[in-house]
Image: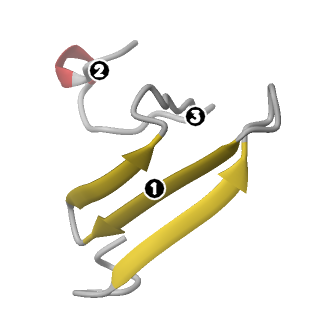
Amino acid sequence: MRWLFPGSLIRVEAPCLDCGEPLVIEMRDEEILTVEPPTMVGYTSSAVGGEASTRPFR
C-alpha cells in the first residue's frame, strides 16, 4: 500500500466471503500491524510476490 498511501495507516474491514464473519487488516507501508482473526489467509488469481521459487505459498 505504500505506493498509494505512503506512511498512512490503512484499515480494511470486510466480511469473509465463505462464512460472513468480519475480517480486519491494518497496515502501514510494508508492515502488517493488525490481523483479525489471526488465522486469516488470502488468495489471489494473479502472480504476487516476485519469483515463484521465493513465494511462501504456491
Q: Could you tell me how far apart the alpha carbons at marks 1 and 3 are, in whole angstroms?
A: 16 Å
Nearest-to-viewer mark from 1 and 2: 1
Res 5 quadrant in image: bottom left
| Percent coordinates x, y for residue 6 in the rendering | 26, 87
Q: Residues within 10 Å of mark 3 (few under 14, many from 20)?
A: few
Q: Name the residue beneath numbered marker 2.
A: 52
- Indicate the secondary structure of the residue bearing disc 3: loop
| Percent coordinates x, y for residue 16 in the rendering | 73, 38
Q: Is residue 42 above or below residue 35?
A: above
- Name the quadrant of the N terminus: bottom left
Mark number for residue 12? none
Q: Residues within 10 Å of mark 2 (few under 14, many from 20)?
A: few
- Indicate the secondary structure of the residue bearing disc 1: strand
Residue at horizontal 40 percent and vertical 12 percent from the top: 58
Q: Name the residue beneath numbered marker 1.
A: 25
> In this image, 38 relative to 40: left or right?
left
Q: Name the residue beneath numbered marker 3.
A: 44
| Percent coordinates x, y for residue 13 in the rendering | 62, 61
> In this image, 23 relative to 1: left or right?
right
Amino acid residing under circle 2 = Ala
Q: Could you tell me how far apart the alpha carbons at marks 1 and 2 are, in whole angstroms?
A: 25 Å
- Indicate the secondary structure of the residue bearing disc 2: helix
* Among the two numbered marks 1 and 2 on one chain, the one whose residue lies closer to the N terminus: 1
Res 43 quadrant in image: top right
